[in-house]
Image (cartoon, grey):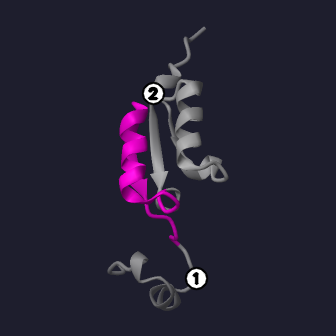
Amino acid sequence: METPAPLSRLCIHTITTKPLPLAQAVKSYKNLGSGGITVWRDALQPQGPKESAKILADSGLAVVSLCRGGFFPATRLPMRWRRSPRTRSRPT
């Protein structure tokens, strides 16, 4: 029987536990033994970037990535461009 990988290699996205404030999510992930976190941008908004950075730095979790969210605000490319300038990129 194969030994399972340790949870310390696990990264949890804040969108997975969206109702939790960032500080509570960090504490919960840490208590579960997770070693990393992917932070969705909306999780930073309530306390702002400086306090969020402090929460994350103090947590000891590896910040694997920052996810912008809002990928598909419409089904057609022209409408996506109009609705969300933050998601604009040159179409391929």
Q: Residue at x 32, y 80 (%)?
A: 90
Q: Few, some or many C-alpha atoms within 10 Å of disc 1 (few <14, some 14-19, many ≥20)?
A: some
Answer whether residue 3 is magenta in the image: no
User: Is residue 28 placed above or below 15 in the rendered structure?
Assistant: above
Q: Are marks 1 and 2 in contact (CB under 8 Å)?
A: no
- Would residue 61 be visible to someone looking at this image? no
Numbered range of the magenta stretch: 44-71
Element under disc 2: helix
In this rendering, would 53 be left or right of 35?
left
User: Is residue 24 placed above or below 80 in the rendered structure?
Assistant: above
- For residue 58, the mark is none
Q: Residue at x 45, y 87 (%)?
A: 81
Between residue 2 and residue 21, name the one nearer to us. Answer: 21
Q: Residue at x 50, y 65 (%)?
A: 69
Mark 1 vs 2, N-terminal side: 2
Task: Kindly identify the amino acid type of the residue bearing the numbered disc 1.
Answer: Ala
In this rendering, would 53 be left or right of 15?
left
**Rendering quarter of residue 72:** bottom right
Q: Quadrant of the C terminus?
A: bottom left
Between residue 6 and residue 30, name the one nearer to us. Answer: 30
In this rendering, would 83 be left or right of 91?
right
Q: Few, some or many C-alpha atoms within 10 Å of disc 2 (few <14, some 14-19, many ≥20)?
A: few
Task: Give the Cα distance between marks 1 and 2.
Answer: 35 Å
- For residue 9, the mark is 2
Q: Which residue is mark 1?
A: 74
User: Is residue 60 placed above or below 44 in the rendered structure?
Assistant: above
Q: Looking at the picture, how far across and down is residue 30, in whole percent?
A: 52, 29
Element under disc 1: loop
In the displayed image of the protein, which residue is found farthest to the left? Answer: 90
